[in-house]
Image (tube, helix red, strand yellow):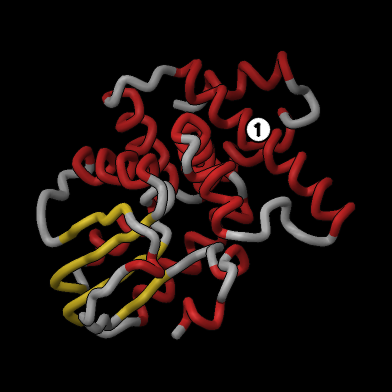
């Protein structure tokens, strides 16, 4: 299933290869995540995204994380500190966002730390009472949003993301998984939304630390 990625890194990045091999082996003890990865890859292939593009996306994620970790260690802050900078340099670059979301989707099922975060979300979702409305801000690769839909705990589901690539990839994933109703995906800056609906469960993951005004965002 993911052998093409292993074969690439065994030859082109032997430093990362042992970690990747161990991560793939870990899927044997997590059948649910194994099935998620299979469905995710099948969706990418059906969308016309070939193995070479998947490898390039994952490799781009690796290099970006390495580069930005070094930057943070040196400067003690993120490279971009305002929403305008991030929009101009990141969110508006659709090719970059497409690669990033594909790579992040794969890492969320392969890397132990990301699998732990997804498992934590599933545990918290299971504890919630059945409600009417679910809201997720920053849907990213769409895996959490798909898990929420699968739970069937809510009557309607709303996902918001500032990246059109994120909304497009999430929509394709949901359609591939057979979801056709009870949800809507909105490509918009959350701060510009004027809805007055109340929600029973609100989710945002790995997002608050990037918000320029976290207090206003929470309010």
- The residue sitting at 41% across, 17% down in the picture is 50
Q: Is residue 171 above or below residue 125?
A: above
- The residue sitting at 32% across, 82% down in the picture is 128
On the image, which quarter does residue 17 sit in?
A: top right
The answer to whether 19 appears left or right of 202 in the picture is right
On the image, which quarter does residue 83 sit in?
A: bottom right
Q: Position of residue 192 (x, y in %)?
A: 35, 67
Closer to the camera in the image, 86 or 31: 86
Q: Position of residue 103 (x, y in %)?
A: 53, 36
Mark 1 is surrounded, within 10 Å at the Cα level, by few (under 14), some (14 to 19) or many (20 or more) other residues, namely some
Q: Position of residue 115 (x, y in %)?
A: 54, 54
Q: Position of residue 33 (x, y in %)?
A: 43, 48
- Residue farthest along the right direction in this orientation: 74
The answer to whether 209 appears left or right of 197 in the picture is right
- The residue sitting at 65% across, 32% down in the picture is 21
The residue to which callout 1 is attached is 21
**Any part of residue 106 in sight:** no
């Amino acid at each position: 299933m993911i052998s093409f990625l292993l074969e690439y890194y065994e030859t082109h990045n032997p430093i990362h290869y042992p970690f990747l091999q161990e991560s793939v082996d870990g899927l044997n003890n997590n059948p649910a995540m194994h099935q998620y990865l299979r469905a995710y890859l099948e969706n990418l292939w059906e969308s016309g995204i070939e193995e070479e593009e998947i490898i390039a996306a994952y490799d781009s994620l690796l290099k970006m994380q390495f580069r930005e970790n070094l930057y943070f260690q040196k400067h003690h802050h993120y490279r971009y500190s305002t929403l305008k900078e991030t929009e101009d340099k990141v969110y508006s670059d659709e090719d970059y966002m497409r690669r990033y979301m594909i790579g992040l989707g794969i890492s969320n099922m392969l890397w132990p730390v990301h699998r732990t975060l997804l498992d934590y979300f599933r545990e918290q979702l299971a504890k919630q009472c059945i409600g009417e409305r679910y809201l997720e801000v920053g849907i990213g690769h769409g895996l959490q949003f798909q898990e929420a839909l699968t739970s069937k705990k809510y009557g309607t589901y709303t996902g918001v993301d500032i990246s059109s690539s994120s909304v497009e990839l999430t929509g394709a994933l949901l359609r591939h998984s057979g979801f056709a109703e009870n949800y809507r995906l909105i490509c918009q800056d959350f701060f510009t939304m004027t809805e007055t609906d109340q929600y029973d469960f609100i989710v945002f993951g790995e997002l608050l630390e990037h918000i320029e005004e976290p207090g206003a965002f929470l309010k």
